[in-house]
Image (cartoon, rainbow, N blue to C red):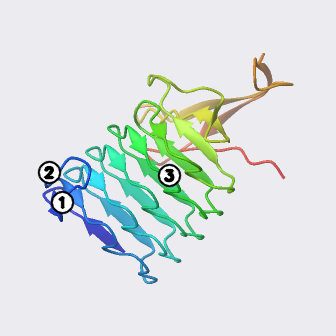
Amino acid sequence: SVTIPRNVISLGVDEKTRTSEFYGGWAFSGCSSLTNVTIGDGVRYIGKNTFAGCGNLSHLSLGNGVIDIDDEAFYDSPNLVQVTFGSAITHIGAFAFYNATQVEGLYFFGDKPSLGLRVFGDGGGLVYYRPEKVGWGTSFAGRPTATWIESNPSQHTDTIVLESSTQLENPSWNPIATNTINRTQPQRYYRLRAY
């Protein structure tokens, strides 16, 4: 595991803007021992191939300062399961997460970012976004989307409504089941999987 602290803002030079708020290209490329990466709020830009070929990387959390992920930054991370994007992300470059075929969830705290070519490749997974954010639709980069609502820590139950629709382009959602879930943890996320 590696954690890039919030006070790190420079490792090389950003090729796009010639500033020092950059996380250097190829810095961790091919590092098979990495399983979890947390990037602090100070990093603004993740360079090309910075974490490419990290075959055992499974969880990635990007801080609220990251605004741009360059081409192929996390290319060929076949065991990546979950990615959390901070609130500032505005662009994800071409093939940035290509060959991340095991992704189950992509979580976005911010507005919908622009995308390069085939950012996520052919993998599956659901894209979650905050309901108050703009630009989101029923799909993102070929993946279905869903609103991501965090539990209210002052409540001890969550009500979850399962809805269905016969189409996704112009959906008409109909409730088909309602469940109340008691919880003991202050924060919990839910997902629905089809078998």
Q: Amino acid at mark 2?
A: Thr
The answer to whether one can see residue 188 in this image is no
Q: In the rendering, at what x and y percent does residue 35 appear?
A: 45, 74
Given the image, on which type of amino acid does mark 1 rest? Val
Earlier in the chain: of badge 1 and badge 3, it is 1
Label 1 Cα crowd, 10 Å radius (few <14 / some 14-19 / many 20+): some
Upstream in sequence: badge 1 or badge 2: 1
| CA–CA distance in space, label 3 to label 2 | 21 Å
- Identify the element where label 2 is drawn: loop
Crowding around mark 2 (Cα neighbors within 10 Å: few <14, some 14 to 19, many 20+) is: few
Q: Which residue is mark 3?
A: 94
The reply to whether callout 1 and callout 2 are in contact (CB within 8 Å) is yes
Q: Which residue is mark 2?
A: 19
**Which residue is under mark 1?**
13
Along the viewing direction, whichever of 188 and 104 lies nearer the viewer: 104
Q: Is residue 23 left or right of residue 171?
A: left
